[in-house]
Amino acid sequence: MSRGDNGESVYDDKRRQFLKAVGLGGIVGLAGCTGNEPTGTTTSGGDGGGDGGDGTSTDGGDGGSTETDSSDGEASSGMKTFIKAKNQPLTHLDPQAINDGTMIELGTVYDTLLDYAKEDPTTIRPMLATDWESVNGAQQWVLTLREGVEFDDGTPFDAYAAKRSLERAKKLTAGQSKPYDWIESIEESGDYEVTINASGAYGPAPAQLTFVTTSVMNPTALDEHWDEENFGHEYFKTNVHGTGAFDFEEWDKGNKFVATLDEDNWRFDIDDPPANLAIPEEANIGTFRGEIVREQLTQKQRVAKGDIDVSRDINWTNTQEIVNNNENVALYDGGPDLYAKYVFMMCQREPTSDVNFRKALAYAADYTGIAEELFGTGVPWGTPWPQGIPFRVTEGQYRRDLEKAEEFLEKSVYDGRELKFRSIKGSTNDKVGSALVANFEEIGVSMNHEDIPWSNLYEQLTSAETMPDLLMYSGWPDVADPDGPAVRYWSEYWPPSGWNTAYYANEEYDEMYIEARESGDRQRRKELYQQMQQLLLEEVPIIWLYQEKYQRAINANIPNYSYTPGDFNYVPAHQFTKNG
């Protein structure tokens, strides 16, 4: 859907010949331009980062047949289908309003202005913007936009399209829109240039523009379906108009999401593209299929058989079993991920409002045993910033120390009563929760732990009055800039506006947070973020339990599998080669 960076046809002849040889045109002709009305049953969404569980469910069923139609058209076309399974359904199709871990599929059909370097969340790369620079001490950000990109109906991507989408991201109160308070206004400073005026100097701007909620949406469709109440959300919940590598084809809510490769996508037109945009000549994925498979046993069986290429939710024990017993399955090891396990402690109510009590629990937790022995693919954590975030402080990192735990417990207001500890339903959370309960009992603290369905849990955490004493779930920073983890502790990010589910509030922290996000001085930002971490280590509103290693059982016939760190955008299936 593009004409080249300069508006002229510069399509790679070898690539076009390859696509024609394998018959891609016949597949792409099936792609739809708008969404389908959802069918099937719906299940609840996630927590901003998924549940971190293993996919088991008491709902019954696996969200569909154990067989798939993944081979449809493959024999005649030569193109392959890539299937990614998970237990968490896509709740709707509006990328700017998404509020949970189901956003991954939408990165196949929508593009953001900027992107991460492939497998490196701390380096920013071009996407729909080819260049970006700060002006006036980061009070303004000027973006040069890619030329020759079109939406599904021929509407050109230009300064108006970028401006329209950014304005909507700022106005929309659904999803993760809170971080866009920094945008004061957007100007069309050229046909293919926009200037973003910040409400103050704002250093994290490039990282924020990589997040899925800044996905660029067709301005023609936005104008046609705009309303002042929800800004077109009702329409975009079930309709897709993007510039992604894939064209939307089908959404069966609660069961599957299907998109087919766009042979005229702008990515094919780029000379000497960076790694995040390069498409190898041998790439042959013509269809992306996201499936909801709620039962882990079914996921395990289907990965072993080869009719699922990768599953997000299979636990480490089952992953090892599948890899060791099936020659057609390989282990992909992406190393430590930004995806991590948090235990939030309610800071607005005793006894967890007492910092001595919070320290007692933090020192009682067996970080290493839970991460490495129980979970299996965890990296013991213990500090506010996960690995992979710049300016990380590790001095003062929490580790199990029962002597210190008992010392702080003795100084606390804890009166011996049983506390409420909740997590999202899943056998991993059940096991980790049980292990923590045993850790706490060793120092004389009693916990009632239950893992419950997300919909029920979400109702509890959106109010300080109903929030449990302890809450455990997995999540990741929205962006790999330090502002990503820092926003989680900002008092204005309490639910339902954000994910500060500890209901932590500290005026000193808030002042440093605002100064750090408004600063254009990298050294000053570093100083502030490190001071903020030291304050958090002292007040420990969260037990930072472990980061997950991105280790998955994958189809061994996909030798160049890769992922976006944290799963917070998408799996770049259009770059993959599937043999056999």
Image (tube, grey):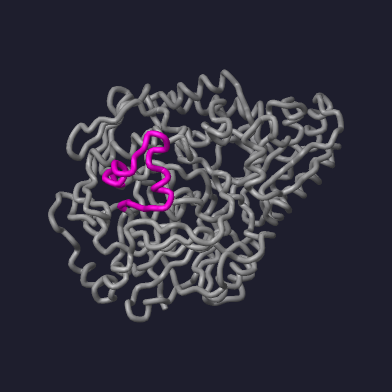
Look at the image and tell me whether residue 119 can be seen: no
Q: How far from the left and from the top, in percent, is residue 182?
A: 40, 27
Residue 232 among magenta residues:
yes
Horizontally, residue 508 falls left or right of residue 263, namely right
Q: Quadrant of the C terminus?
A: bottom left
Image quadrant where residue 196 sits: top left
Percent coordinates x, y for residue 560 in the rendering: 41, 65
Picture coordinates of residue 266 (x, y %)?
Answer: 25, 55
The segment highlighted magenta reads 218-243
Residue 97 visible in the shown view: yes
Taking the spot 18% from the left edge, 55% from the top edge, the residue there is 3
Please, which residue is most extreme toward the left here? Answer: 8
How many marks can you see?
A: 0
Residue name at image x 38 percent, y 69 percent: 577
Taking the image as shown, residue 394 lies to the left or right of residue 26, namely right
Of 341 and 95, the residue lying toward us = 95
In screen coordinates, is 189 left or right of 206? left
Vertical arrangement, residue 364 with respect to residue 41, above or below: above
